[in-house]
Image: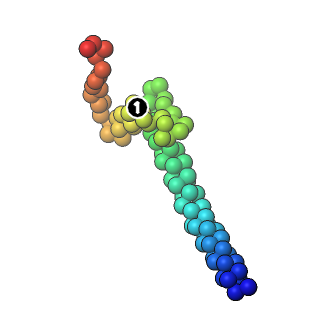
């Protein structure tokens, strides 16, 4: 019986530890989501000034090609940035 009691206590400790890990992870996930929403809204405020206006819907996918980041930098700096075409289409 003693071995079984010890095994039960160990499994309870593990499940309590897993629960506390989940409880710690949840606020981090919520904070990350809130920061992503906030930064996306902040970007959209500046990007709405563009002609035509640009809007970010999904922060991580929309900025991958760099076009929206260039537009944001132009709005923030007030300067037109030079665009470089790295793909000429010829080999």
Name the outermost residue toward the top: 90
Q: Tell me where residue 87 appears, x and y as whole percent.
A: 30, 20
**Residue 68 falls in which quadrant of the image?**
top left
Describe residue 62's horizontal placement relative to residue 77 as left or right: right
Q: Position of residue 53 (x, y in %)?
A: 49, 29
State the residue in front, 48 or 71: 71
Asked whether residue 30 is in view, the answer is yes
At x 30%, y 30%, the residue is 80
Q: Residue at x 51, y 49 (%)?
A: 36
Q: Quadrant of the C terminus?
A: top left
Q: In this view, does 27 lie to the left or right of 91?
A: right
- For the point 29% across and 26% down, the residue is 83
Q: Residue 21, position in %: x, y?
A: 58, 67
Mark 1: few/some/many CA within 10 Å (<14, 14-19, 20+): few
Residue 44 in sight in this render: no
Residue highlighted by disc 1: 65
| 8 up-or-down from 64: above or below | below
Residue 1 x %, y %: 73, 85
Secondary structure category for the residue under label 1 = loop
Q: Which residue lies furthest to the bottom in this view?
A: 2
| Residue sitting nearer the eye, 91 or 8 | 8
Q: Is residue 26 above or below residue 10?
A: above
């Amino acid at each position: 019986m003693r071995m079984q009691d010890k095994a039960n206590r160990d499994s309870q400790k593990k499940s309590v530890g897993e629960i506390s890990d989940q409880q710690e992870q949840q606020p981090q996930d919520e904070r990350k989501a809130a920061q992503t929403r906030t930064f996306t809204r902040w970007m959209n405020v500046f990007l709405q000034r563009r002609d035509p206006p640009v809007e970010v819907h999904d922060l991580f996918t929309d900025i991958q090609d760099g076009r929206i980041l260039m537009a944001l930098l132009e709005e923030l700096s007030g300067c037109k940035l030079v665009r470089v075409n790295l793909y000429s289409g010829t080999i």
